[in-house]
Amino acid sequence: MSVSQDAAGAALRPGPARFLLLLAVFICAACGLVYELALVALGSYLVGNTVLQTSIVLSVMVFAMGIGSLAAKPLQRRAAGAFALVEGALALIGGLSVLMLYAAFAWLNIYTVAMVAVAFCVGVLIGAEIPLLMTLLQRIRRQDAGRAVADMFAVDYIGALIGGLSFPLLLLPLLGQIKGALVVGAVNAVAGMVVVLWLFRHRMRRVVRAGLWAGMAGVLAVLGAAFVFADSFEVTARQQLYRDPIVHAERTPYQDIVITRAPGLAGGPDLRLFLDGDLQFSSVDEYRYHEALVHPALAGDRSSVLVLGGGDALALREVLRYEDVERVVLVDLDPAMTRLGRSYGPLVELNGGALEDPRVTVVNEDAFRWLREAPPEKFDAVLVDLPDPKSTATAKLYSVEFYTLISRAMAPDGRLVVQAGSPFFAPRTYWSIETSLREAGFGTTPYQVDVPTFGNWGFVLAGRQAAPPARLAGQVPELRFLDQEVLSAATVFPLDRRAEEVQASTLMRPRVLEYRRQEWRIN
């Protein structure tokens, strides 16, 4: 019986020893990809602009992996101990990465700098793994370099596949970002350190082995303590981002939902909804926004109405004030948002229980996909109450293609209204949305109002035949803010905020995202 004493220092055949080491490669590769994806996802949640965040993380990590591979050269003489140290450091930094970056975002306001530093450190450590593992494999059993590389990278890539699928399908839903990264760090420490320390234990001095085992125990202790306090940390860090006390918070597969509540200026409560950190409404003045959004679009036929977005049901509340509205379809991506609109007491009180009205049908689906596959129903009015184009996922909902799909779902004399951001703070974004509507074949009537918590805010009223007049219905319900005089004045823009020469936004060129990023950074 041939036993590889040089490799493992234990009574193991080369085959089982190689299997255990390749298993460690598999697990470490899965963990490494989870760290990458966690950094990308966190940046997208906190900062937006998914493409930029992904590009920064991946480019920094790939560059750092090259540095790590070079740095591993002098470590190959003591490959087993060096690999154990690398895995311990990677488990600690990678496991704590989300927690550290969230703290940098909430308290220090240095998220981008911290993210680049963490991505670089993780990349260096991942890059150092392969040369050290290759050396260890060759010590177990010498083989042709090409075959050894093929075995190593095959297992590495399969591990990356499993890690890539586990992150969105298992770790995020069950544990969330912070705890998910901590658990992966612990798995990384055990797989990377234990296997090597056991296989090569007789090739290390006793004091080195003891030190490495103690180091691994320390890493696991730190990650375990962080896991225990992760929930309280997240609550404290999240509260740091908001002025008012948080009364509800949840992370869904689609967004971060936060509701705050504080005494309002007039003595009543100020309930505020934030999606991914962006304010969606304040109960103090939301009626201004929703009256301006809804009632100009319902001045014509309105027996059937389509609402895209608006899962809080505040726009829906205004629609249902018209008794001749027979059917409303509300399409909102996130079932958690419509569930809150239906069951969260303060929000139900604000929307008047609109989601329980028998005229309402709720569809939890991506609006773009739903419009492509929607039944051949023609709506008299369409209200687009979607989050601002902060990422590529939302930018497609402000594209020429999206508005073309809406046109197909409208009656010939139907009206469409789009919330389009601030003409004052982001004029190019606003006028790009208006230009995109015209590019899709609509006639447009831009208008803007003042909403104190938002500032100056703009909408675009559109029709398939021609630009519809900005008017209210003859039998409009009693409103608190909007009347015909206010609406007529809202169509007049000051000299410094009138239409600009901007380009339409499309799926292949989301210019609205580029404009928004430039303008909100300046302002």
Image: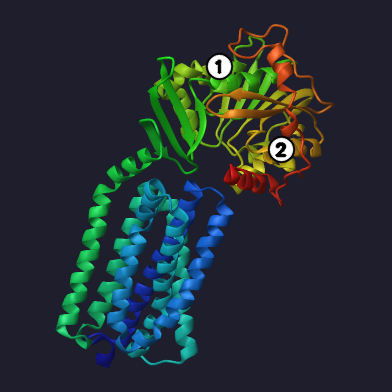
* Residue 462 visible within the image: yes
Q: Is residue 514 above or below residue 79?
A: above
Give the residue furthest to the right.
465
Q: Quadrant of residue 358?
A: top right
Q: Residue at x 42, y 58 (%)?
A: 114
Rendered location of residue 351, percent (x, y): 50, 19
Left or right: 86, with 389 as reference point: left
Residue under label 1, please give it.
358
Left or right: 227, with 498 as reference point: left
Q: Is residue 521 above or below residue 297?
A: below
Check if mark 2's residue and mark 1's residue have beta carbons within 8 Å: no
Q: Residue at x 35, y 30 (%)?
A: 245
Q: Quadrant of residue 225?
A: bottom left
SS assignment at label 2: helix
Which of the image's four quarters has the N terminus?
A: bottom left
Left or right: 152, with 6 as reference point: right
Rendered location of residue 36, percent (x, y): 45, 62
Q: Quadrant of residue 261?
A: top left
Rendered location of residue 418, percent (x, y): 68, 30
Residue under label 2, please give it.
433
